[in-house]
Image: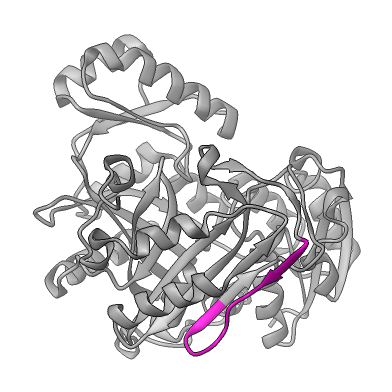
Amino acid sequence: MFQKVLIANRGEIAVRIIQACRDLGIISVAVYSEADREALHAQIADEAVCIGPARAADSYLNMDNIISAALASGCQAIHPGFGFLSENPDFAERITQAGLAFIGPTAATIRLMGDKSEAKRNAIAAGVPVALGTDGPLRDFDEAISEAERIGYPVMLKAASGGGGKGIRVAESVKDLKDAYDSASAEAIANFGDGRLYMEKYIHNPRHIEVQILGDNYGNVVHLFERECSVQRRHQKLIEESPSAFVTPELREKMTSAAVALAKRVGYRNAGTIEFLVDNDRNFYFCEMNTRIQVEHPVTEEVTGVDLVCEQLRVAAGEPLSFKQEDLTIRGHAIECRINAEDPSRNFAPCPGTLVSLHLPGGPGVRVDSAAYQGYKIPPFYDSMIGKLIVYGADREQAIVRMRRALAEMLFEGVVTATDYQMHILCSKAFVEANFNVNSIANGDFD
């Protein structure tokens, strides 16, 4: 096992990784920007290194500074968390070239599955269902016109190097296509430096269901069942749960088997997530693969009893998976609400500021993963998520009741959060009956 690990991230995921390192007796090294000098992750880590100014490009995206900090502090490995450089194959490659371990898949695998067109080709080769679409990125808008006619409207344009809901647009007809193409490409360039798009048939009001997988260096790959991630606003997830109330045992077997088959085909190791879109008839289609730990990983941990971050560290250190597929079962139900410093009354505008006071909920079945504390100044430079509220129940009904209780107890003074908005969703008939899809917020299904 590693003796010292650097965490190339910030916020609650950096805190979460520090906690896992402590559980395994590993010394943790945090990195922080000048804006994050007082951040919780920089305070609780065993060691902390400033890697640059507030701007992410000068700090959390600065590969040279991060790798130099790891080498100077005597680390053997780097954990990228999620976001920032977590799915950057060049970063993974440079880490291994520096003689360090990258806590994630290989650079080659990240490159393969990070390109949506290549990922789709591998899914087809592994026998995984895919939606009708282009075989590779569109060359230009003229090709987009001809491909849309072939595929049939509505179509979805997606960033070839995208993720996190960025660079996605839907065109209902040819008159919408130009605006969708231009805006998706512009957003892809702004977020990924790559404006290439591919196109696929748009599935009407689908569910977004993903499968957590883990692989080691010895060819072992397991799934840890599914997560329901359909409560979204503009492709950004707000509430996640496991298991999905929509998934039948038969569908679960098909989806998880498909996920494992794809992961084995690409020689996947460490933690990853394979995302599917599922139509009303429970036909499922490969969407993309996230080659990192997910924001919503805690709900899987709650229902399986597996510490995914500790398992990431063990696998990266060369250990085989500590369990087999037959050892895993779903126990109860878990729900997660992302706690974002955003104002729903102002179109979810970010609300940086000082947390004058806060109260975090507790009691049976409640977990809070957060980097927030009283007096903390939330900087305006990064993602607005300040924590995650996770509850566990013996069944979905109990989990919903506990989440309502926990949301009611969670109080913040000084910043606005979306917790009241999430409470509204949790109390809606559509959510209680699990009758929703990725467009339910836009369609007003929770009103």
Q: Where is residue 47 in the image (x, y as percent from the top left)?
A: 87, 71
Q: As displayed, is residue 70 above or below residue 404?
A: above
Whole-percent x, y for residue 50 in the image: 89, 55
Q: Which of 291 and 201 is in front in this view?
A: 201
Query: As drawn, is 201 to the left or to the right of 110?
Result: left
Total number of numbered discs in the rendering: 0
Q: Residue at x 51, y 22 (%)?
A: 186
Q: Is residue 269 visible?
A: no
- Percent x, y of residue 86: 60, 53
Q: In which quarter of the image is residue 442?
A: top left
Give the image quarter of residue 212.
Answer: bottom left
Farthest left residue?
281
Its colouring scheme is: one colour
- Please give the name of the residue rendered at 65% of the width and 72% of the height, measured from the top-left corner: 16
Position of residue 302 in the picture relative to residue 75 (left or right) = left
* Residue 251 versus residue 92 in the image, above or below: below
Tell me: 351 left or right of 34: left
Which residue is rendered at x = 51% and y = 37% of the image? 347
* 362 within the magenta span: yes
Horizontal and vertical percent for residue 424? 39, 59
* Quarter of the image that includes the N terminus: bottom right
Q: Is residue 300 magenta?
A: no
Question: Which residue is more in the foreground, 178 or 346?
Answer: 346
Q: Residue at x 16, y 50 (%)?
A: 279
- Boundaries of the magenta span: 356-367
Q: Is residue 42 above or below residue 288?
A: below
Let me know if residue 371 appears in the view. Answer: yes
Given residues 308 and 357, the one toward you in this image is: 357
- Rendered position, 132 above or below 440: above
